[in-house]
Amino acid sequence: MPEPVAVTSLLAQAQRRVEDYRPGLRLLEQGTVGAVGDGIAWIEGLPSAAMEELLQFEDGSLAQVFHLTQTRVGAVLLRQTAALTAGTRAALTGRVLQVPAGDALLGRVVDPLGRALDGGEDPEASRHQPLEAPSPPLTERDFVNQPLLTGCKIVDTLLPIGRGQRQLIIGDEGTGRSALALDAVINQRDSGVRCVYVLVGQKRSAVVSTLELLRQYGAMDYTTVVVGEASALAGLQYLAPFAGCAVAEGWMQQGHDTLVVYDDLSAHARAYRELSLLLRRPPGREAYPGDIFYLHARLLERTTRLAPAAGGGSMTALPIVQTEQGEIAAYIPTNLISITDGQIYLDADLFASGFQPAIDIARSVSRIGGKAQHPRIREAAGSIKLDYLQFQELEVFTRFGARLEPAMEARLHRGRVLRELLKQDRLQPVSMVGQMAWLTAFTHGMFDGVELGRINAVLERLLQALAGSGPGVDTPEQDWLAWLPAQLGTPMSGP
Protein backbone atom coordinates (compact mmCIF):
# COMPACT_ATOMS: atom_id res chain seq x y z
CA MET A 1 0.00 0.00 0.00
CA PRO A 2 1.60 3.37 -1.01
CA GLU A 3 2.37 5.92 1.72
CA PRO A 4 0.26 9.14 1.92
CA VAL A 5 1.65 12.19 0.13
CA ALA A 6 2.01 14.17 3.40
CA VAL A 7 4.15 11.42 4.98
CA THR A 8 6.31 11.24 1.87
CA SER A 9 6.81 15.01 1.95
CA LEU A 10 7.81 14.97 5.62
CA LEU A 11 10.27 12.15 5.00
CA ALA A 12 11.76 14.08 2.07
CA GLN A 13 12.17 17.19 4.24
CA ALA A 14 13.84 15.15 6.97
CA GLN A 15 16.14 13.57 4.39
CA ARG A 16 17.16 16.98 3.01
CA ARG A 17 17.76 18.28 6.54
CA VAL A 18 20.08 15.38 7.27
CA GLU A 19 21.93 15.81 3.96
CA ASP A 20 22.35 19.56 4.48
CA TYR A 21 23.58 19.22 8.05
CA ARG A 22 27.18 20.30 8.54
CA PRO A 23 28.95 20.05 11.88
CA GLY A 24 30.47 23.31 13.11
CA LEU A 25 30.86 25.71 16.00
CA ARG A 26 27.58 27.38 16.96
CA LEU A 27 27.24 30.06 19.63
CA LEU A 28 23.96 30.35 21.48
CA GLU A 29 23.28 32.96 24.13
CA GLN A 30 20.81 31.71 26.71
CA GLY A 31 19.10 33.32 29.66
CA THR A 32 16.65 32.29 32.32
CA VAL A 33 13.13 33.50 32.90
CA GLY A 34 13.00 35.34 36.23
CA ALA A 35 9.29 36.18 36.24
CA VAL A 36 6.32 35.78 33.92
CA GLY A 37 2.75 37.04 34.03
CA ASP A 38 0.17 39.31 32.31
CA GLY A 39 1.74 38.69 28.91
CA ILE A 40 5.17 39.85 30.08
CA ALA A 41 8.37 37.92 30.81
CA TRP A 42 11.53 39.11 32.55
CA ILE A 43 14.66 37.29 31.44
CA GLU A 44 18.07 37.36 33.10
CA GLY A 45 21.37 36.61 31.39
CA LEU A 46 20.97 37.95 27.83
CA PRO A 47 23.50 40.82 27.65
CA SER A 48 23.49 40.90 23.83
CA ALA A 49 19.72 41.21 23.43
CA ALA A 50 18.53 43.96 21.08
CA MET A 51 15.20 45.75 20.92
CA GLU A 52 12.50 43.94 18.89
CA GLU A 53 14.61 40.77 18.67
CA LEU A 54 12.70 37.52 18.98
CA LEU A 55 13.30 35.20 21.92
CA GLN A 56 12.65 31.48 21.76
CA PHE A 57 11.87 29.62 25.00
CA GLU A 58 12.62 25.97 25.55
CA ASP A 59 8.91 25.20 26.10
CA GLY A 60 8.00 26.58 22.67
CA SER A 61 6.87 30.05 23.77
CA LEU A 62 7.87 33.07 21.71
CA ALA A 63 8.47 36.67 22.81
CA GLN A 64 9.79 39.96 21.51
CA VAL A 65 12.33 42.10 23.35
CA PHE A 66 10.49 45.23 24.44
CA HIS A 67 12.55 46.71 27.30
CA LEU A 68 16.22 46.62 28.25
CA THR A 69 17.80 47.21 31.66
CA GLN A 70 21.36 46.65 32.89
CA THR A 71 20.55 43.24 34.35
CA ARG A 72 17.29 42.06 32.82
CA VAL A 73 15.38 41.96 29.55
CA GLY A 74 11.65 42.70 29.43
CA ALA A 75 9.79 40.87 26.67
CA VAL A 76 6.19 40.77 25.46
CA LEU A 77 4.88 37.27 24.91
CA LEU A 78 3.58 36.47 21.42
CA ARG A 79 3.00 32.76 22.00
CA GLN A 80 2.68 31.30 25.48
CA THR A 81 2.40 27.71 26.62
CA ALA A 82 1.22 26.46 29.99
CA ALA A 83 4.73 25.21 30.73
CA LEU A 84 6.32 28.68 30.72
CA THR A 85 7.42 29.43 34.28
CA ALA A 86 10.31 31.01 36.17
CA GLY A 87 13.47 29.07 35.44
CA THR A 88 12.63 28.31 31.80
CA ARG A 89 15.57 28.89 29.51
CA ALA A 90 15.33 31.49 26.74
CA ALA A 91 17.64 32.03 23.76
CA LEU A 92 18.25 34.86 21.32
CA THR A 93 17.24 34.07 17.75
CA GLY A 94 18.92 36.97 15.94
CA ARG A 95 15.69 37.51 14.02
CA VAL A 96 13.01 40.20 14.00
CA LEU A 97 9.33 39.57 13.52
CA GLN A 98 8.04 39.17 9.95
CA VAL A 99 4.63 38.32 8.52
CA PRO A 100 3.68 36.61 5.25
CA ALA A 101 2.80 38.98 2.43
CA GLY A 102 1.48 38.69 -1.10
CA ASP A 103 -1.57 37.29 -2.85
CA ALA A 104 -1.70 34.27 -0.53
CA LEU A 105 -3.13 36.66 2.08
CA LEU A 106 -6.14 37.70 -0.01
CA GLY A 107 -9.38 36.55 1.57
CA ARG A 108 -7.63 35.33 4.72
CA VAL A 109 -8.12 36.13 8.39
CA VAL A 110 -4.81 36.04 10.26
CA ASP A 111 -3.34 37.11 13.57
CA PRO A 112 -0.37 39.53 13.80
CA LEU A 113 2.06 36.60 13.44
CA GLY A 114 0.48 35.53 10.15
CA ARG A 115 -1.22 32.44 11.58
CA ALA A 116 -4.60 31.55 10.11
CA LEU A 117 -7.69 32.30 12.21
CA ASP A 118 -10.27 31.24 9.61
CA GLY A 119 -9.88 27.50 10.10
CA GLY A 120 -7.61 27.00 7.09
CA GLU A 121 -3.93 26.26 6.78
CA ASP A 122 -1.46 29.02 7.55
CA PRO A 123 -0.82 31.13 4.42
CA GLU A 124 2.22 29.95 2.47
CA ALA A 125 3.55 33.21 1.09
CA SER A 126 6.54 33.59 -1.19
CA ARG A 127 7.72 36.71 0.60
CA HIS A 128 7.71 38.09 4.12
CA GLN A 129 7.61 41.67 5.35
CA PRO A 130 9.14 42.99 8.60
CA LEU A 131 6.61 44.48 10.98
CA GLU A 132 8.92 47.38 11.76
CA ALA A 133 10.39 49.12 8.74
CA PRO A 134 11.48 52.69 7.96
CA SER A 135 9.07 54.86 6.01
CA PRO A 136 9.89 55.44 2.33
CA PRO A 137 12.30 58.37 1.79
CA LEU A 138 11.11 61.54 0.08
CA THR A 139 12.98 60.64 -3.10
CA GLU A 140 10.75 57.56 -3.51
CA ARG A 141 7.48 59.39 -2.90
CA ASP A 142 5.09 60.97 -5.37
CA PHE A 143 2.22 63.44 -5.08
CA VAL A 144 -1.24 62.24 -4.13
CA ASN A 145 -3.04 62.60 -7.47
CA GLN A 146 -5.63 59.81 -7.73
CA PRO A 147 -8.91 59.70 -5.79
CA LEU A 148 -9.90 56.89 -3.48
CA LEU A 149 -13.69 56.76 -3.79
CA THR A 150 -15.61 55.68 -0.71
CA GLY A 151 -19.13 55.95 -2.19
CA CYS A 152 -20.09 58.40 0.60
CA LYS A 153 -21.56 61.64 -0.78
CA ILE A 154 -20.07 63.88 1.92
CA VAL A 155 -16.61 62.34 1.79
CA ASP A 156 -16.23 62.08 -1.99
CA THR A 157 -17.46 65.63 -2.66
CA LEU A 158 -16.60 67.76 0.39
CA LEU A 159 -13.81 65.76 2.12
CA PRO A 160 -12.10 63.88 -0.73
CA ILE A 161 -9.48 61.25 -0.04
CA GLY A 162 -6.54 60.58 -2.35
CA ARG A 163 -4.63 57.34 -2.76
CA GLY A 164 -1.67 57.58 -0.41
CA GLN A 165 -3.43 59.84 2.09
CA ARG A 166 -3.91 59.34 5.85
CA GLN A 167 -7.45 60.34 6.80
CA LEU A 168 -8.49 59.99 10.44
CA ILE A 169 -12.02 58.87 11.34
CA ILE A 170 -12.84 60.23 14.79
CA GLY A 171 -15.93 60.22 16.99
CA ASP A 172 -17.69 58.80 20.01
CA GLU A 173 -18.62 55.15 20.31
CA GLY A 174 -21.75 54.28 18.34
CA THR A 175 -21.56 57.13 15.83
CA GLY A 176 -20.75 54.95 12.81
CA ARG A 177 -16.95 55.16 12.59
CA SER A 178 -16.44 51.50 11.70
CA ALA A 179 -19.49 51.54 9.41
CA LEU A 180 -17.98 54.38 7.38
CA ALA A 181 -14.67 52.51 7.05
CA LEU A 182 -16.42 49.26 6.08
CA ASP A 183 -18.45 51.09 3.42
CA ALA A 184 -15.17 52.41 2.02
CA VAL A 185 -13.70 48.89 1.88
CA ILE A 186 -16.82 47.42 0.25
CA ASN A 187 -16.83 50.24 -2.34
CA GLN A 188 -13.35 49.19 -3.56
CA ARG A 189 -14.80 46.25 -5.48
CA ASP A 190 -13.65 46.42 -9.11
CA SER A 191 -11.43 49.42 -8.34
CA GLY A 192 -8.19 47.45 -8.18
CA VAL A 193 -7.50 48.55 -4.60
CA ARG A 194 -6.47 45.78 -2.19
CA CYS A 195 -7.66 46.24 1.37
CA VAL A 196 -6.38 45.30 4.82
CA TYR A 197 -8.76 45.63 7.77
CA VAL A 198 -7.07 45.58 11.18
CA LEU A 199 -9.21 44.85 14.23
CA VAL A 200 -7.56 45.76 17.53
CA GLY A 201 -8.90 45.00 21.00
CA GLN A 202 -12.44 44.20 19.83
CA LYS A 203 -14.78 41.54 21.16
CA ARG A 204 -15.09 38.33 19.21
CA SER A 205 -18.74 39.12 18.41
CA ALA A 206 -17.66 42.39 16.76
CA VAL A 207 -14.96 40.56 14.80
CA VAL A 208 -17.46 37.96 13.58
CA SER A 209 -19.94 40.68 12.60
CA THR A 210 -17.27 42.49 10.57
CA LEU A 211 -16.22 39.31 8.78
CA GLU A 212 -19.82 38.37 7.95
CA LEU A 213 -20.45 41.80 6.46
CA LEU A 214 -17.30 41.66 4.32
CA ARG A 215 -18.19 38.17 3.10
CA GLN A 216 -21.82 39.12 2.43
CA TYR A 217 -20.75 41.86 0.03
CA GLY A 218 -17.94 39.87 -1.55
CA ALA A 219 -15.23 42.13 -0.13
CA MET A 220 -13.07 39.26 1.14
CA ASP A 221 -11.98 38.57 -2.44
CA TYR A 222 -9.65 41.57 -2.23
CA THR A 223 -9.29 41.98 1.54
CA THR A 224 -7.11 40.60 4.33
CA VAL A 225 -8.31 40.87 7.92
CA VAL A 226 -5.71 41.05 10.72
CA VAL A 227 -7.20 40.39 14.15
CA GLY A 228 -5.77 41.16 17.58
CA GLU A 229 -8.97 40.66 19.56
CA ALA A 230 -9.58 41.74 23.14
CA SER A 231 -8.93 38.26 24.59
CA ALA A 232 -5.55 37.93 22.85
CA LEU A 233 -2.22 38.64 24.49
CA ALA A 234 -1.55 42.36 24.88
CA GLY A 235 1.55 41.90 22.74
CA LEU A 236 -0.56 40.68 19.80
CA GLN A 237 -2.92 43.65 20.13
CA TYR A 238 0.08 45.96 20.12
CA LEU A 239 1.52 44.34 16.97
CA ALA A 240 -1.73 44.05 14.98
CA PRO A 241 -1.58 47.50 13.25
CA PHE A 242 2.08 46.95 12.31
CA ALA A 243 1.23 43.54 10.85
CA GLY A 244 -1.59 45.05 8.76
CA CYS A 245 0.71 47.83 7.61
CA ALA A 246 3.37 45.29 6.60
CA VAL A 247 0.87 43.29 4.52
CA ALA A 248 -0.32 46.44 2.72
CA GLU A 249 3.25 47.63 2.32
CA GLY A 250 4.16 44.41 0.52
CA TRP A 251 1.46 45.02 -2.10
CA MET A 252 2.39 48.70 -2.37
CA GLN A 253 6.00 47.77 -3.14
CA GLN A 254 4.72 45.49 -5.90
CA GLY A 255 2.92 48.44 -7.52
CA HIS A 256 -0.61 47.90 -6.19
CA ASP A 257 -2.92 50.47 -4.62
CA THR A 258 -3.93 49.47 -1.10
CA LEU A 259 -6.27 50.66 1.62
CA VAL A 260 -5.61 49.80 5.27
CA VAL A 261 -8.09 50.48 8.08
CA TYR A 262 -6.87 50.56 11.70
CA ASP A 263 -9.95 49.88 13.84
CA ASP A 264 -9.09 51.35 16.23
CA LEU A 265 -5.94 53.10 17.46
CA SER A 266 -7.49 54.04 20.83
CA ALA A 267 -7.49 50.36 21.79
CA HIS A 268 -3.99 50.10 20.36
CA ALA A 269 -2.77 52.97 22.54
CA ARG A 270 -4.33 51.33 25.61
CA ALA A 271 -2.58 48.02 24.85
CA TYR A 272 0.73 49.86 24.49
CA ARG A 273 0.13 51.68 27.78
CA GLU A 274 -0.64 48.38 29.52
CA LEU A 275 2.58 46.80 28.26
CA SER A 276 4.64 49.86 29.19
CA LEU A 277 3.27 50.04 32.72
CA LEU A 278 3.82 46.31 33.25
CA LEU A 279 7.42 46.80 32.16
CA ARG A 280 7.75 49.74 34.57
CA ARG A 281 8.37 52.40 31.97
CA PRO A 282 7.89 55.93 33.32
CA PRO A 283 4.29 57.06 32.71
CA GLY A 284 3.48 60.44 31.20
CA ARG A 285 0.24 62.23 30.40
CA GLU A 286 -2.82 60.03 31.13
CA ALA A 287 -0.30 57.29 32.12
CA TYR A 288 0.75 56.80 28.49
CA PRO A 289 4.50 56.39 27.95
CA GLY A 290 6.40 59.33 26.56
CA ASP A 291 6.88 57.77 23.12
CA ILE A 292 3.17 57.20 22.38
CA PHE A 293 3.29 59.91 19.68
CA TYR A 294 6.28 58.22 18.04
CA LEU A 295 4.42 54.89 18.14
CA HIS A 296 1.62 56.12 15.87
CA ALA A 297 3.81 58.45 13.82
CA ARG A 298 6.15 55.65 12.74
CA LEU A 299 3.12 53.53 11.82
CA LEU A 300 1.30 56.17 9.76
CA GLU A 301 4.41 57.65 8.12
CA ARG A 302 4.71 54.43 6.12
CA THR A 303 1.52 55.47 4.31
CA THR A 304 2.37 57.13 1.03
CA ARG A 305 2.19 57.08 -2.73
CA LEU A 306 5.35 55.75 -4.33
CA ALA A 307 6.92 57.34 -7.38
CA PRO A 308 6.82 55.31 -10.64
CA ALA A 309 10.55 54.58 -10.29
CA ALA A 310 9.88 53.01 -6.88
CA GLY A 311 7.00 50.86 -8.07
CA GLY A 312 4.14 53.36 -8.28
CA GLY A 313 1.96 51.71 -5.64
CA SER A 314 0.16 53.47 -2.85
CA MET A 315 -1.06 52.85 0.67
CA THR A 316 -4.05 54.82 1.94
CA ALA A 317 -4.73 54.68 5.68
CA LEU A 318 -8.01 55.20 7.53
CA PRO A 319 -7.06 55.13 11.22
CA ILE A 320 -10.02 55.20 13.60
CA VAL A 321 -9.88 56.79 17.04
CA GLN A 322 -12.52 57.10 19.73
CA THR A 323 -13.43 60.24 21.65
CA GLU A 324 -15.21 60.51 25.01
CA GLN A 325 -18.21 62.86 25.19
CA GLY A 326 -17.11 64.48 21.94
CA GLU A 327 -13.81 65.68 23.43
CA ILE A 328 -11.74 66.10 20.29
CA ALA A 329 -8.88 67.73 22.23
CA ALA A 330 -8.03 64.61 24.27
CA TYR A 331 -4.46 63.31 24.23
CA ILE A 332 -4.56 60.45 21.69
CA PRO A 333 -7.03 62.16 19.26
CA THR A 334 -4.94 65.34 19.11
CA ASN A 335 -1.81 63.29 18.51
CA LEU A 336 -3.42 61.53 15.57
CA ILE A 337 -4.96 64.72 14.17
CA SER A 338 -1.48 66.24 14.03
CA ILE A 339 -0.05 63.16 12.29
CA THR A 340 -2.72 62.61 9.63
CA ASP A 341 -3.68 64.63 6.54
CA GLY A 342 -7.19 65.39 7.72
CA GLN A 343 -10.03 64.04 9.81
CA ILE A 344 -13.65 62.99 9.42
CA TYR A 345 -15.43 63.87 12.65
CA LEU A 346 -18.64 62.03 13.51
CA ASP A 347 -20.95 63.80 15.93
CA ALA A 348 -23.23 62.00 18.40
CA ASP A 349 -25.89 64.74 18.28
CA LEU A 350 -26.09 64.55 14.49
CA PHE A 351 -26.41 60.78 14.72
CA ALA A 352 -29.23 61.09 17.26
CA SER A 353 -31.04 63.64 15.07
CA GLY A 354 -31.11 61.20 12.15
CA PHE A 355 -28.43 62.82 10.00
CA GLN A 356 -26.38 59.87 8.79
CA PRO A 357 -23.56 59.51 8.15
CA ALA A 358 -23.21 61.80 11.15
CA ILE A 359 -20.26 63.74 9.74
CA ASP A 360 -19.76 67.17 11.25
CA ILE A 361 -18.68 69.08 8.15
CA ALA A 362 -17.48 72.08 10.16
CA ARG A 363 -15.01 70.00 12.17
CA SER A 364 -13.88 67.79 9.30
CA VAL A 365 -11.19 68.56 6.79
CA SER A 366 -9.15 66.91 4.06
CA ARG A 367 -5.91 68.80 3.55
CA ILE A 368 -4.57 67.14 0.41
CA GLY A 369 -7.48 65.12 -1.04
CA GLY A 370 -8.64 68.02 -3.22
CA LYS A 371 -5.54 67.60 -5.38
CA ALA A 372 -6.67 64.08 -6.24
CA GLN A 373 -10.33 64.91 -6.81
CA HIS A 374 -11.72 64.82 -10.34
CA PRO A 375 -11.64 68.42 -11.63
CA ARG A 376 -15.34 68.40 -12.59
CA ILE A 377 -16.37 67.15 -9.13
CA ARG A 378 -14.04 69.68 -7.47
CA GLU A 379 -15.53 72.49 -9.54
CA ALA A 380 -19.13 71.44 -8.87
CA ALA A 381 -18.57 71.01 -5.11
CA GLY A 382 -16.43 74.13 -4.78
CA SER A 383 -18.84 76.38 -2.89
CA ILE A 384 -21.16 73.78 -1.37
CA LYS A 385 -19.20 73.34 1.89
CA LEU A 386 -19.16 77.07 2.56
CA ASP A 387 -22.86 77.40 1.67
CA TYR A 388 -23.75 74.57 4.04
CA LEU A 389 -21.77 76.03 6.94
CA GLN A 390 -23.43 79.43 6.39
CA PHE A 391 -26.83 77.72 6.34
CA GLN A 392 -26.12 76.06 9.70
CA GLU A 393 -25.28 79.42 11.28
CA LEU A 394 -28.36 81.03 9.73
CA GLU A 395 -30.61 78.24 10.94
CA VAL A 396 -29.38 78.67 14.51
CA PHE A 397 -30.13 82.40 14.28
CA THR A 398 -33.71 81.85 13.05
CA ARG A 399 -34.52 79.73 16.10
CA PHE A 400 -35.01 82.97 18.01
CA GLY A 401 -38.20 83.56 16.02
CA ALA A 402 -36.98 86.45 13.88
CA ARG A 403 -39.13 87.33 10.86
CA LEU A 404 -37.23 86.64 7.66
CA GLU A 405 -37.23 88.20 4.24
CA PRO A 406 -38.20 86.02 1.24
CA ALA A 407 -34.58 85.90 0.05
CA MET A 408 -33.47 84.62 3.44
CA GLU A 409 -36.27 82.04 3.47
CA ALA A 410 -35.06 80.82 0.08
CA ARG A 411 -31.51 80.42 1.39
CA LEU A 412 -32.79 78.43 4.34
CA HIS A 413 -34.82 76.19 2.06
CA ARG A 414 -31.80 75.48 -0.16
CA GLY A 415 -29.78 74.63 2.93
CA ARG A 416 -32.43 72.17 4.09
CA VAL A 417 -32.52 70.65 0.60
CA LEU A 418 -28.76 70.20 0.70
CA ARG A 419 -28.97 68.58 4.13
CA GLU A 420 -31.47 66.06 2.79
CA LEU A 421 -29.25 65.35 -0.20
CA LEU A 422 -26.24 64.70 2.02
CA LYS A 423 -28.07 62.04 4.03
CA GLN A 424 -27.17 58.52 2.99
CA ASP A 425 -27.98 55.03 4.24
CA ARG A 426 -25.33 52.43 4.93
CA LEU A 427 -24.13 50.25 2.07
CA GLN A 428 -25.74 52.52 -0.53
CA PRO A 429 -22.64 53.83 -2.33
CA VAL A 430 -22.93 56.56 -4.94
CA SER A 431 -20.66 56.40 -7.98
CA MET A 432 -18.60 59.34 -9.22
CA VAL A 433 -21.13 59.91 -12.03
CA GLY A 434 -23.90 59.90 -9.44
CA GLN A 435 -22.02 62.52 -7.42
CA MET A 436 -21.70 64.67 -10.53
CA ALA A 437 -25.44 64.33 -11.24
CA TRP A 438 -26.75 65.46 -7.85
CA LEU A 439 -24.14 68.22 -7.57
CA THR A 440 -25.13 69.65 -10.95
CA ALA A 441 -28.83 69.35 -10.22
CA PHE A 442 -28.50 71.04 -6.82
CA THR A 443 -26.26 73.82 -8.12
CA HIS A 444 -28.85 74.74 -10.76
CA GLY A 445 -31.78 74.61 -8.35
CA MET A 446 -33.48 71.52 -9.75
CA PHE A 447 -34.26 70.23 -6.25
CA ASP A 448 -35.63 73.55 -4.97
CA GLY A 449 -39.21 72.75 -5.94
CA VAL A 450 -39.16 69.26 -4.43
CA GLU A 451 -40.70 68.66 -1.02
CA LEU A 452 -38.08 67.78 1.58
CA GLY A 453 -39.69 64.42 2.28
CA ARG A 454 -39.46 63.41 -1.41
CA ILE A 455 -35.87 64.41 -2.10
CA ASN A 456 -34.37 61.00 -1.39
CA ALA A 457 -36.91 59.30 -3.66
CA VAL A 458 -36.20 61.77 -6.47
CA LEU A 459 -32.46 61.31 -6.02
CA GLU A 460 -32.85 57.55 -6.09
CA ARG A 461 -34.77 57.79 -9.35
CA LEU A 462 -32.03 59.96 -10.80
CA LEU A 463 -29.30 57.47 -9.82
CA GLN A 464 -31.27 54.61 -11.34
CA ALA A 465 -31.60 56.55 -14.59
CA LEU A 466 -27.83 57.02 -14.62
CA ALA A 467 -27.31 53.28 -14.30
CA GLY A 468 -28.86 52.90 -17.75
CA SER A 469 -27.41 55.33 -20.25
CA GLY A 470 -26.70 58.76 -18.85
CA PRO A 471 -24.00 61.38 -19.22
CA GLY A 472 -20.48 60.78 -17.89
CA VAL A 473 -18.38 62.80 -15.48
CA ASP A 474 -16.58 64.52 -18.36
CA THR A 475 -19.79 65.33 -20.24
CA PRO A 476 -20.10 69.11 -20.87
CA GLU A 477 -22.33 70.94 -18.44
CA GLN A 478 -24.78 71.97 -21.15
CA ASP A 479 -25.46 68.32 -21.92
CA TRP A 480 -26.05 67.64 -18.21
CA LEU A 481 -28.48 70.56 -18.04
CA ALA A 482 -30.36 69.17 -21.04
CA TRP A 483 -30.55 65.65 -19.56
CA LEU A 484 -31.31 66.29 -15.89
CA PRO A 485 -34.74 68.08 -16.07
CA ALA A 486 -36.22 65.18 -18.01
CA GLN A 487 -35.16 62.77 -15.26
CA LEU A 488 -36.15 64.95 -12.33
CA GLY A 489 -39.28 66.47 -13.79
CA THR A 490 -38.32 69.84 -12.32
CA PRO A 491 -37.25 73.03 -14.08
CA MET A 492 -33.90 74.71 -13.56
CA SER A 493 -34.11 77.74 -11.24
CA GLY A 494 -30.49 78.34 -10.31
CA PRO A 495 -27.67 80.06 -12.19
Image (cartoon, rainbow, N blue to C red):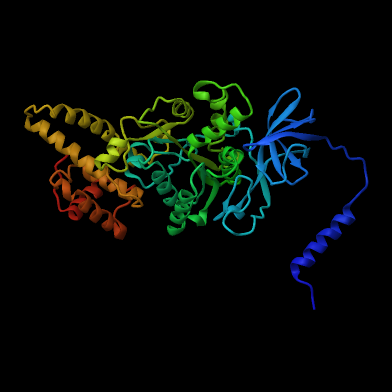
Q: Which residue sits furthest bottom? A: 1
Question: In front here: 407 or 334?
Answer: 334
Q: Is 61 on the left-hand or right-hand side of 352?
A: right
Residue 295, quarter of picture: top right
Q: Quadrant of the N terminus?
A: bottom right
Q: Is 116 on the left-hand or right-hand side of 394?
A: right
**Residue 495 appearing in the image:** no
Image spot of residue 312 (x, y percent):
56, 42
Question: In front here: 374 or 49?
Answer: 49
Image spot of residue 362 (x, y percent):
31, 30
Q: Is 84 on the left-hand or right-hand side of 335?
A: right
Image spot of residue 138 (x, y percent):
58, 30
**Residue 134 appearing in the image:** yes
- Identified at 63% across, 51% down, the residue is 115
- Identified at 54% across, 21% down, the residue is 284
Q: Quadrant of the C terminus?
A: top left
- Identified at 56% across, 38% down, the residue is 306
Residue 466, quarter of picture: bottom left
Residue 157, quarter of picture: top left
Up the image or down, 321 lies above or below 103; here it is: above
Question: In front here: 364 or 37?
Answer: 37
Q: Is 372 on the left-hand or right-hand side of 447?
A: right
Image spot of residue 100 (x, y percent):
65, 48
- Identified at 59% across, 48% down, the residue is 111
Total marks in image: 0
